[in-house]
Image (tube, helix red, strand yellow):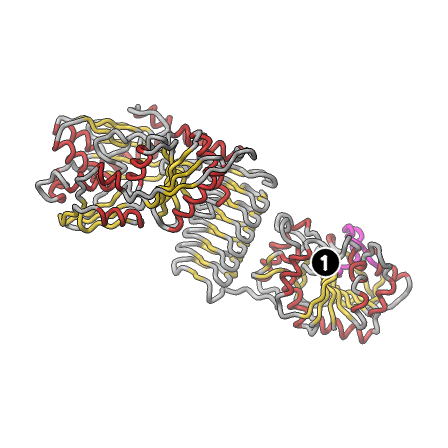
Amino acid sequence: MKSVIMAGGMGTRLKPLTCLKPKPLVPFMGKPLIDHVMDHLEANGIKEHILTLFHLPQMIIDHVSVQDRVVDFIIEKEPKGTAGSVKEAAEFLKNTFVVASGDSITDIDLKKALEFHRKKGALATIVLTRVPEPLEYGVVLTNADGKITRFLEKPTWGEVFSDTVNTGIYILEPEVLEYIPKGRSYDFSRDLFPALLKAGLPLLGYIAEGYWSDVGSIIQYRESHFDVLRGMVKSVKPVIDEAADIDSTARIVQPVSIFKGAKIGANAKIGPFTVVGKGAVVGKGCEVAYSIVGGKAYLGDGVTAEGTIVDERAYVGEGSKLSESTIVAEDTKIGERTILTPLVKVYPQKYVGPMSVLNTDLIYGSLEGGHLFTEEGLRGKLHRDLTVDILLKTGVAFSEVQGARVLGAASSGDDKAEFVQRILSLGANGKGADVVDFGEQVVPSFRLELKGAAVDGGFYAFSEGEYVTIRFFDAEGCYLDTARQRKIENLLRSGDSLNPDTEPGKIYYNPSQFTIYLNRYQDFVVPKDTVCDSPAGRILLDQIKSKEPVGLKAQISASGEHCRIWDEKGHELSQAELEAASVYLSLKRSPKNIKVPLGATSSLEEIASEFGGHIERTRPGLCYLDESVIPWHDAFRFLTLICTNRDEPLYRILEKLPKKTQIVRELNCPLEERSKAMLKFASSYGTSSQNEAGLYYRDDRSFLYLKPDERKPVLRLTVEGESMELAEELVGRILDLIK
């Protein structure tokens, strides 16, 4: 026996899930709707299928053709209605056949329906089911023998004389096709069946037991998933696949389905009534309930989603909140700490920037939010935050901001960083700038290369774990200032600024293997047990000859800017101890003025007072500390400072340094409340600095530093006191002040 599956619909009521795919390919419980339909038919002995197609037919053909099924396709050039589309397949239908919809979920026993059809000698049998609210369906009235007596198309409550509705499943004899006119639109419910009824032909209704759902709207799509989770559908069962990677600390609240390859992070809470598709990732600490997460979707750490649909391959940044009835369509990217208010739909392939609040549907364009640049540069995950498109446009924008004819480029040498460098270079070439590739470098050596070369600036890429960071520099090798970073952001948001008449630039290779850097600084002393997190850093370490076995251990960051140090007893120095030790050793050698980050430990003033030096606090960005005698952004020289000018072990020096109890807290603060909180702090404590880098207060007993996070809706509070009691008391005061 054959089936004719009507699979040509536009799926308008399922938008935005159907914007880029036909309705039969919308995923449902781990596979497309059309697969569920064919599985059900084949389970009832109907092994051959004809699919009638109209909207995006090739996508359905490609999907079905690779399966082990007997399938033919009819492609309509224009819509001909439900009956008209089946008429197109008339030459293939010589025996009793079944018509089904390509977008319904059911476990109705069609064998019993076929038995009824044959026993009654029907020309056409409509499979009916009972529903509690029939207003959205075509109501069909039958007599005791099953003969249809009346049709009501979407009746009002005053017209409801029955709760039996048309499922869209029909058992037909081939003679029925003779009553369907060829070449024009003709519908089963509106045209054919009323005509058969009027002609007195054997038209019957079979009232079936079992589950049936027309997955025609977003509401019904969600409810149908929940019905499966409730165990209402015999043919589709909820499952937690053995191949899913579920952290032992994750909490699973039934009913849920988690499919093959899905990954659930630590301390995540999944359920109730939640489906996680194949290959989807739900990060640490996420809370997901009453939601559908599509295959290969990604929810970053700390995402909350309740009553939402996250479609296939959608990306939701960490800390974001998806409210009731929101939809994030396929291939869409939602930035970190973003809020989607109830009922909002984000259409496919859109971008919502970090820390945004979206309260209307996003259908066209994108919504930028927050800043791309932070104090750490341009940073994100490759292909998620830093897409090829964004990287190309960044190369273009940087070239324009610098007015560049020639730029320098380098990377830390790993695959991700080199890839990012190449794409940025191509963007610069597209703007007409030549690019000199200085090969594998660390930031300190690259900056010297730029300063000595005839270039208009440069960029450097390095990776740390999942993240890639890009640093930008001016013609003197200085970190790019905030004003020019903002100009790059504005260009990225307004357009790529490419002129079709621009001749593309070229790439020149000039790897120097750190020659300038090593010639400039010849007195390196680093611990023998020093490692670096990048290929370039490891190459440089091999070339540094002076590696003293002083009992210290060190780890240098991938960019070569920062380091971690362990003293002779294996104690890792905190940031405050690194600051204090470096200032102590520098001032001990000669009293001087030393620039330090704005939020550096308050013990530095005490150390400076002891040696007759002076501490100047300055904004903590990368651009403002280059004139300090302490090489804050050069780990190799910083280590040299720590390793030299010592006549005693480092742990002994740490014992001599002023002791401060330091508490660092992240205080949740909505973006719209940030200014108010900072003003409260300033009005109560006064400030030694009032700028976007933060506010600080210092007296003889305590030190306070309050700084807004550039990406997250939090304030970072650093408190130092003479004792833990004083520090905790100060934290409590600040919390009460700005809450």
Of 703 and 583, nearer the camera is 583
Residue type, mark 1 in image: Leu
Is 267 one of the magenta-colored residues?
A: no
- Please provide percent x and percent y for residue 140: 79, 60
User: In which quadrant will I find the C terminus?
Assistant: top left
- The picture quadrant where one finds residue 85 is bottom right
103 vs 357, left or right, is right
Image mark count: 1
State whether residue 34 appears in this view. yes
Of 460 and 425, nearer the camera is 425
- Direction left: furthest residue: 647
Q: Residue at x 22, y 49 (%)?
A: 530
- Direction right: furthest residue: 199
Q: Is residue 129 above or below residue 527?
A: below
Q: Is residue 439 above or below residue 120?
A: above
SS type, badge 1: strand
Q: Residue at x 28, y 38 (%)?
A: 444
525 vs 423, left or right, is left
- Please provide percent x and percent y for residue 526: 18, 45
State whether residue 355 appears in this view. no
668 vs 229, left or right, is left
User: In which quadrant will I find the N terminus?
Assistant: bottom right
- The picture quadrant where one finds residue 373 is top left
160 vs 391, left or right, is right
Of 454 and 72, nearer the camera is 454
Would you call the spot at circle 1 few (<14 residues within 10 Å), some (14-19), or many (20 or more)? many
- Please provide percent x and percent y for residue 266: 39, 55
Residue at numbered disc 1: 53
Q: Is residue 376 above or below residue 234?
A: above
Find the magenta span and give its range: 150-166
Q: Is residue 1 above or below residue 177?
A: below
- Please provide percent x and percent y for residue 71: 69, 67
